[in-house]
Amino acid sequence: MDEKEKMLNGELYFPNGDDILEEQFACLELLYDYNQTRPSEGKKRETLLKKMFAELGEHCYVEPPLRANWGGHHVHFGDYVYANFNLTLVDDTHIYVGHHTMFGPNVTVATAGHPILPEIRQELYQYNIPVHIGNNCWIGAGSIILPGVTIGDNTVIGAGSVVTKDIPANVVAVGNPCRVLRAIGERDREYYYRDRKIPKEFLDT
């Protein structure tokens, strides 16, 4: 197994080999171009994202600046994914995001980790574990999602959370470390924020 295969399969590997860096820098050149686009250059942004990402669904929007170790090269977005500014994707291996998922500002999704043992860490070895985020999730501002985490469909991650373990579908989860606060339930069908009721026309669609 070569270093690139180890990089994508959760094995300890050396990330600074010439072959890996050459491919990575080419991806980062595209990321640089993306972050220099003007707000009026929507078509250019879409074209660049399709080159940058492993998969890009329909009608995705990523507000620059975007940060990504591999420029999105190992990122898979479904349809209608929205990301606010300063999304950081530590995409040394694969990140999967389902349809209609939203990221608030300053969210970090990390796949890379480093050994606890300092003797290995000082030699610059690392490992990468994929992250899976389901359909129709909302990841609140400033949240951090750590390597190997899976977040189920429809789940809301509260702002500032640090997600260290899997979170199931259909819940609101918050905190550091992030824990399930409650299930999404009947009250959420009536109120969109505290005591503010959802207008009837939204419920009839």
Image (tube, rainbow, N blue to C red):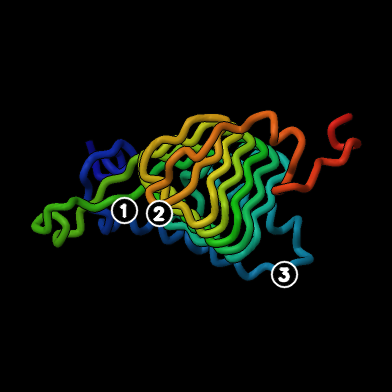
In the rendered structure, the answer to whether residue 145 lies left or right of residue 194 reads: left
Mark 3 or mark 2, which is nearer to you? 3
Q: Quadrant of residue 123?
A: bottom left
Residue 171 placement (x, y as % from top left)? 55, 34
For the point 40% across and 56% down, the residue is: 24
SS at badge 1? helix
The reply to whether dot 2 and dot 1 touch (C-beta < 8 Å) is yes
Residue beneath disc 3: 38
SS at badge 2? helix
Give the amino acid type for the residue marked by disc 3 in the picture.
Arg
Outermost residue toward the left? 119
Circle 1 crowding by C-alpha within 10 Å: few under 14, some 14–19, many from 20: few
Residue beneath disc 2: 23
For the point 49% across and 54% down, the residue is: 143
Give the amino acid type for the residue marked by disc 2 in the picture.
Glu
For the point 16% across and 57% down, the residue is: 121
Residue 188 placement (x, y as % from top left)? 69, 36
